[in-house]
Amino acid sequence: MNEPNVDTGTSPDATATDHTRSRYDLAAPVYDLMEWPIERGLYRSWRETLWAEVDGPQVLEIGVGTGKNIPYYPEGVHVTAIDLSPGMLKRARRVADRHPEKQVTLREMDAQALDFAVETFDDVVATFVFCSVPDPIQGLREALRVTRSGGGLHLLEHMRASPSWLARLMEVLDGPMHWLTGVHIARQTVQNVEAAGWTLDEVSTLSWGDIYRRITAHKSPD
Ligand SMILES: C[S@@+](CC[C@H](N)C(=O)[O-])C[C@H]1O[C@@H](n2cnc3c(N)ncnc32)[C@H](O)[C@@H]1O
């Protein structure tokens, strides 16, 4: 099956990146309200489980959004958390202020062009982000570059469903959804992680149709 949403992992497309930023800036004031039911019903427990396995100590969170992961950052871990959208980051700052016990540095940055040296971090975490990064393979390659050898990648993502009828429907709806919200609903994120050079450790299905999955991978020595 062709992958319509995945770029080739070349240089980031400025127009696509501006589109994503503008959609999240627009959504930022109502984002938490919109997400509240799914956050309470599903995401919260998934976040808790994911972060319990991250020991860093130096961690990069890509696409921190409104800071929903901040309360789950483990003790003794320093998280550098980046996002493309100033509107989302503004809200993450408020959450960080409400949790002075968490060690977090927030920065505005594009995942496709990280401003960090090679092997800066022990682990990289992203939750529901690589559906939105315009060039996900480029973003995942950048994550790999800034992770030390042996370091981990921990993702929660929604992606193209396994049943073929639903996958086809997602492909049809993908364009309008992306235009409206900045989100791609038919990404093949497991394949993207491998294409970027990560070694997969585990992919677990979290929901019907394999739509939500947890992906764990690591950086193998060169
Ligand atoms: C669906 S939200 C998820 C936010 C948060 N991780 C959570 O779990 O609630 C996706 C986030 O990824 C950010 N994002 C999208 N593309 C990005 C990029 N190229 N670089 C950095 N952040 C990006 C968006 O601005 C948005 O805040």
Image (tube, grey):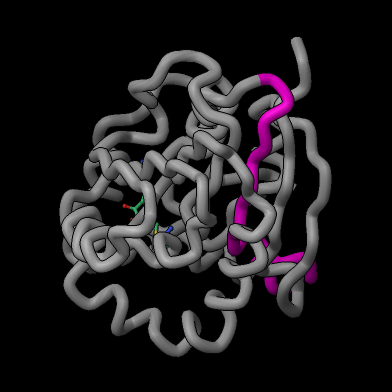
Residue 122: x percent and y percent? 59, 31
The residue at 50%/45% (across/down) is: 77
Q: For residue 167: magenta?
A: yes
Query: Which stretch appears magenta?
Result: 149-168
Q: Is residue 190 left or right of residue 135?
A: right
Residue 165: x percent and y percent? 74, 72
Q: Is residue 101 above or below residue 61?
A: below
The residue at 29%/59% (across/down) is: 100
Q: How many marks?
A: 0
Q: Nearer the viewer, residue 45 or 170?
A: 45
Q: Is residue 52 above or below residue 195?
A: below
Q: For residue 117: magenta?
A: no
Residue 155 makes an appearance in the image? yes
When asked about the image quadrant of residue 81, the answer is top left
Residue 130: x percent and y percent? 51, 48
Residue 76: x percent and y percent? 51, 47
